[in-house]
Amino acid sequence: HCVVWERVWHRCDVSIEGDDEARLARRFKLFQLLVAAPQNTPDSIGAKSLSGYGYRGHIFWDTEIFMLPYLIYTYPQTARNMLLYRYHGLAGARRKAEGNGFSGAQFPWESAGTGDEVTPRWVPDFRDPTKLVRIWTGDIQIHITADIAYAIMQYWRVTGDDDFLRDYGAEMILDGARFWAARAEPEEGPDGDRVYSIRDVIGPDEYHDHIDNNAFTNYIARWQLETGLGVYKWLQANYPAAAGDRGDRLRLTPEALAQWKDVAKGIRFIYDRDTGLIDQFEGFFNLERVDPALFQAADRSLQVIFGIEGANERQVLKQADVIMLLCLFRDEFDARTWQTNWDAYMPITDHRFGSSLGPAFHAWAACEVDRPEEAYTHFMLAARADLRNPRGNAEDGIHAASTGGVWQAAAFGFAGLRHSAEGGSVRPWLPRHWRRLAFQYAYHGQNYAVDIQRGEGGEYRVTHAAI
Ligand code: IFM
């Protein structure tokens, strides 16, 4: 047992020196993720992993956006199994799209055995369990379709697994793109041009429902349409038989592809060209403002304080939304846009009692705006999500998204790991008291080690090499 675990840690541990609590928390989290991961069969990990009955074992975007990157970079075969789980759910995703009157595949917000939507429509109100509360996420939290496509492309870029993209990944991406092309509504734009809106959704920030043109949803939907066009070309160039098959089965006619282009070009993304401020959704900044001091003073979630409707009517965020978008597409936004949106959204986010998914991405984002000490505060909020039980819901099981989130905060945030056409690079932002951050990962089958050390004068000594 010990020998096997030693081997596992050798491959995928993250070493942190200078901070015992962070060290303990990162091992605890990575352990939880590794023991729940399907090593040998197509399967996935629920929002509470194997550690509790919360959410009935259902699988959310937590898996693809939060947990999966760690496995993509350390256990790609396991990551592949998890993406295959989604492939086996394609029939359910197609049923969901069809049931809603759209073509293509619309992945369920909560998924279980078949890939059909399993989000409960009503749950007992936590304030008064004799009453029921309507849960809208299964109906309108639709960004998950593109989140899965994002994970497929990340897997492919990091592993170079062309067979997977050809045989499984492309079909999921293409059928999801068909869904977006059908779901986006054509409208007349301000200059009489044609624009597309995606109305009546919930974005990552679940304090606001039934909103229009959520920046995260629209941006990632556009990305999926453009990616779908690129993937189809890639199939045609490299695997014409597979391209022919997908083209026939998914009816990828020249007219359909032209419509994808038109939607991608016209999809609304509301932001201020002068400042770079992105509207989380249409009308967000018309909502009532809340004194940021309240966020510091609150001892409960802002949704409990204001009520479901009250939170809906105010500028309060449960979790990262625009900030998530910036992280996932970090090199598509300039430094000014990063800073403006950081300044706008961080003070009005319910960091302590909102979603446990937020802090790890806030830590990553803080590194991008050169605030490693603030990054550390958010990192520890994520790291303590289970070991200290700050939300008082430990009996439901662990917060599995934050396990992978902590790895991303360390690798993409503190170490600044990224891959581009020029290869891999790191750009460290360590908190002052960390003396060392080190980890390994695999890229296109080659193992790499990153070792960032801090000298007495605070200077970095960085090694990043193939091993
Ligand atoms: O997927 C999350 C969502 O982002 C916030 N509410 C809980 C879900 C499951 O963890």
Image (cartoon, rainbow, N blue to C red):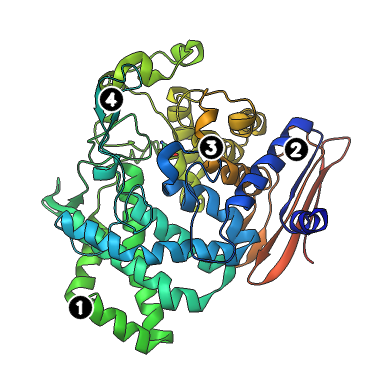
Mark with earlier residue (3, 2): 2
Q: Amino acid at mark 3?
A: His
| Gap between marks 4 and 2 measured at Cα | 38 Å
Residue assigned mark 4 = 312
Q: Which mark lies nearer to you, 3 or 2?
A: 3
Residue 205 found in image quarter: top left
Q: Are marks 3 and 2 in contact (CB under 8 Å)?
A: no
| Gap between marks 3 and 1 measured at Cα | 43 Å
Mark 4 C-beta to ligand 1 under 8 Å: no
Q: Is residue 407 left or right of residue 282?
A: right
Mark with earlier residue (1, 2): 2
Q: Position of residue 117 (x, y in %)?
A: 29, 51
| In this view, 360 is above or below 351 | below
Mark 1 C-beta to ligand 1 under 8 Å: no
Q: Which mark lies nearer to you, 4 or 1?
A: 4
Q: Is residue 40 left or right of residue 326?
A: right
Residue 455, can we see it?
Answer: yes
Q: Amino acid at mark 2?
A: Arg
| Gap between marks 3 and 2 measured at Cα | 18 Å
Q: Which residue occupies 35% across, 76% down?
A: 232
Mark with earlier residue (4, 2): 2
Residue assigned mark 3 = 399
Residue assigned mark 1 = 253
Q: Amino acid at mark 4?
A: Asn
Q: Position of residue 213 (x, y in %)?
A: 25, 42
Q: Is residue 130 left or right of residue 381?
A: left
